[in-house]
């Protein structure tokens, strides 16, 4: 238990500290998100604990939640057409349709009074729910996000 807490503390950080703006491989477009070093570090810990080093953290957007759209996350294999953000063997996977909602977003990991977990700071969200997983997309935003992701 203490070992796990120490690993989490080592992996956490604040937005703006040691971030990586990456262009995804696997897509022809220049859609970008930022993944912080603490997020990559915690992802490596998670993949190691689960014994699934070949997988990545899939981040997707779908209809639902308190504000109309919601983020989802799952450990998954890369699929054709995914944007793949990778550092030191840890991969963040995002399907093309979800990237349209997430362009310019920052994926971070924090362990604070609000809890431990991956967080998405999305500048495209018109409003976000207090739960942190739901947001309202701008009017006229991409249609059909619920059909745009694939995960297990």
Image (cartoon, grey):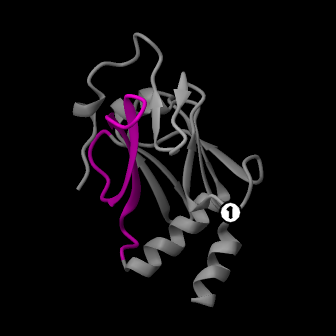
Vertical order, 145 against 71 (above or below): above
Left of 128 or right of it: where is 147? Answer: left
Where is residue 106 shown, x and y percent of the image? 60, 41
Quadrant containing the C terminus is: bottom left
Where is residue 133 shown, x and y percent of the image? 46, 44
Spot the residue most to the top.
Answer: 140
Residue 125 visible to the viewer: no
Where is residue 119 shown, x and y percent of the image? 56, 50
Q: Report the span colored magenta.
A: 52-81
Q: Nearer the viewer, residue 1 or 75?
A: 1
Where is residue 108 shown, x and y percent of the image? 61, 52
User: Tag 1's secondary structure?
Assistant: strand
Query: Dot 1, how many residues are within 10 Å of its Cα: few (below 14), some (14-19), or many (20+)?
Result: few
Q: Nearer the viewer, residue 36 or 144?
A: 144
Quadrant containing the N terminus is: bottom right
Left of 151 or right of it: where is 141? Answer: right
Residue drawn 40% across the image and 30% down it: 28
Is residue 48 one of those drawn in magenta? Answer: no
Left of 58 or right of it: where is 40? Answer: right
Spot the residue most to the right.
Answer: 17
Residue drawn 44% across the image and 43% down it: 25
The number of callouts visible is 1
Q: Quadrant of residue 114?
A: bottom right
Residue 47 visible to the viewer: yes
Residue drawn 58% across the image and 83% down it: 4
Q: Quadrant of residue 134?
A: top left
Q: Quadrant of residue 34?
A: top right
Mark 1 highlights which residue? 112
Residue drawn 30% across the image and 29% down it: 145
Is residue 66 one of those drawn in magenta? Answer: yes
């Amino acid at each position: 238990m203490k070992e796990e807490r120490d690993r989490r503390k080592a992996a956490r950080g604040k937005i703006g500290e040691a971030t990586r703006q990456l262009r995804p491989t696997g897509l022809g477009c220049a859609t970008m998100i930022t993944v912080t070093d603490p997020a990559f570090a915690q992802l490596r810990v998670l993949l190691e604990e689960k014994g699934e080093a070949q997988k990545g953290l899939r981040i997707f957007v779908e209809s639902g939640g308190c504000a109309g759209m919601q983020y989802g996350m799952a450990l998954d294999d890369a699929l054709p057409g995914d944007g793949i953000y990778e550092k030191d063997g840890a991969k963040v996977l995002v399907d093309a349709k979800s990237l349209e909602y997430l362009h310019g977003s920052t994926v971070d990991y924090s362990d604070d009074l609000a809890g431990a977990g991956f967080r998405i700071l999305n500048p495209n969200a018109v409003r976000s729910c207090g739960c942190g997983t739901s947001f309202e997309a701008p009017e006229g935003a991409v249609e059909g996000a619920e059909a745009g992701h694939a995960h297990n």
